[in-house]
Image (spheres, helix red, strand yellow):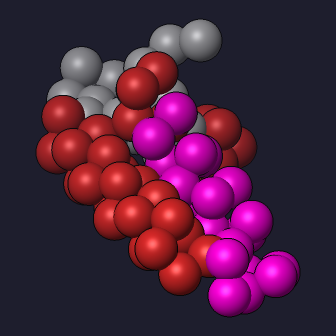
Amino acid sequence: MSRNLGQTDRILRLVAGLIIAAVAWLYGGGWPILGPVLWLVAAVLVLTAGFATCPAYRLLGLSSCPLKKQ
């Protein structure tokens, strides 16, 4: 897969994913449905930041990568 996330987008996704993971870890046990959903959202954000590609961006034809503007 080619990259479609720029550096700023990757950093924001990573920070947001880590914050959501921390919230899920601290408070997730009290929320039987919301806890796992928070973990899933956090995982998606961290993985898309790590791989520098977002499937939703690809479907919409978007890119925040400066080398791959569409």
Above/below status of 70 relative to 44: above
Q: In the rendered view of the protein, which quadrant contains the N terminus?
A: top right
The residue most toward the right is 33
The residue most toward the bottom is 30
Using the rendered image of the protein, determine whether residue 20 is visible from the camera's viewpoint. no
Residue shown at the point (65%, 38%) measured from the top left: 55
Asked if residue 20 is among those painted magenta in the image, a careful observer would answer no
Residue 51 at x, y = what percent? Answer: 46, 21
Above/below status of 46 relative to 27: above
Q: Nearer the viewer, residue 40 or 66?
A: 40
Magenta residues (range): 29-47
Q: Is residue 35 left or right of residue 61?
A: right
Residue 3 at x, y = what percent? Answer: 43, 20
Residue shown at the point (41%, 55%) measured from the top left: 17
Q: Is residue 15 left or right of residue 4?
A: left
Q: Nearer the viewer, residue 28 or 4?
A: 28
The residue most toward the top is 1
Quarter of the image holding residue 16?
A: bottom left
